[in-house]
């Protein structure tokens, strides 16, 4: 029979890392948007409009991706709490024996 294990400390560390990476991507997007705003003021014309539209679409896609990844992060937190609760219940049961 297969044995399923979960190192809860490592799992928590992974969740923390994942959260930090999401925050870094979000901050990078904000910085790129600021840079694009500065660039947008420096020229005009068809190329400007095309670049602005393309960037807006890409930035929107990144925001959508981040929203989905944050939902996944929420699920990871839920699972982590469930694992902790289960482990504490098992520990309590064993302690009563």
Image: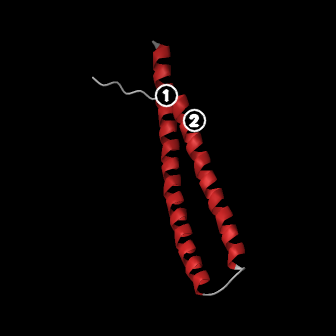
The crowding category of the residue bearing disc 2, from other C-alpha atoms within 10 Å (few below 14, some 14 to 19, many at least 20), is few
Q: Is residue 31 left or right of residue 18?
A: right
Q: CA distance from mark 2 to mark 1?
A: 10 Å
Asked whether the residues under the numbered discs 2 and 1 touch, taking CB atoms below 8 Å apart as contact, a structural biologist would say no
Q: Is residue 76 left or right of residue 37?
A: left
- Residue found farthest to the left: 1
Residue 2, x across and y down, in percent = 30, 25
Give me the residue at 72% from left, 80% from top.
Answer: 41
Q: Is residue 33 left or right of residue 14?
A: right
Give me the residue at 46% from left, 19% from top.
Answer: 93
Residue 96, x across and y down, in percent = 48, 15
Residue tagged 1: 7
Q: Quadrant of residue 43?
A: bottom right
Quarter of the picture containing the C terminus is top left
The crowding category of the residue bearing disc 1, from other C-alpha atoms within 10 Å (few below 14, some 14 to 19, many at least 20), is few
Q: Looking at the picture, does residue 8 appear above or below residue 76?
A: above
Near-viewer residue (32 or 45): 45
Q: Looking at the picture, does residue 80 appear above or below residue 39?
A: above
Mark number, residue 13: 2
Quarter of the picture containing the N terminus is top left
Give me the residue at 57% from left, 72% from top.
Answer: 55
């Amino acid at each position: 029979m297969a044995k399923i294990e979960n190192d809860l400390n490592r799992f928590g560390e992974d969740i923390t890392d994942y959260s930090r990476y999401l925050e870094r991507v979000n901050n990078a997007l904000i910085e790129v948007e600021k840079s694009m705003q500065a660039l947008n003021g420096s020229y005009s014309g068809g190329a400007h409009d095309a670049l602005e539209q393309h960037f807006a679409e890409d930035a929107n896609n990144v925001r959508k991706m981040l929203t989905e990844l944050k939902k996944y992060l929420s699920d990871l937190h839920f699972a982590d709490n469930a694992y902790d609760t289960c482990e504490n219940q098992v520990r309590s049961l064993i302690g009563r024996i």
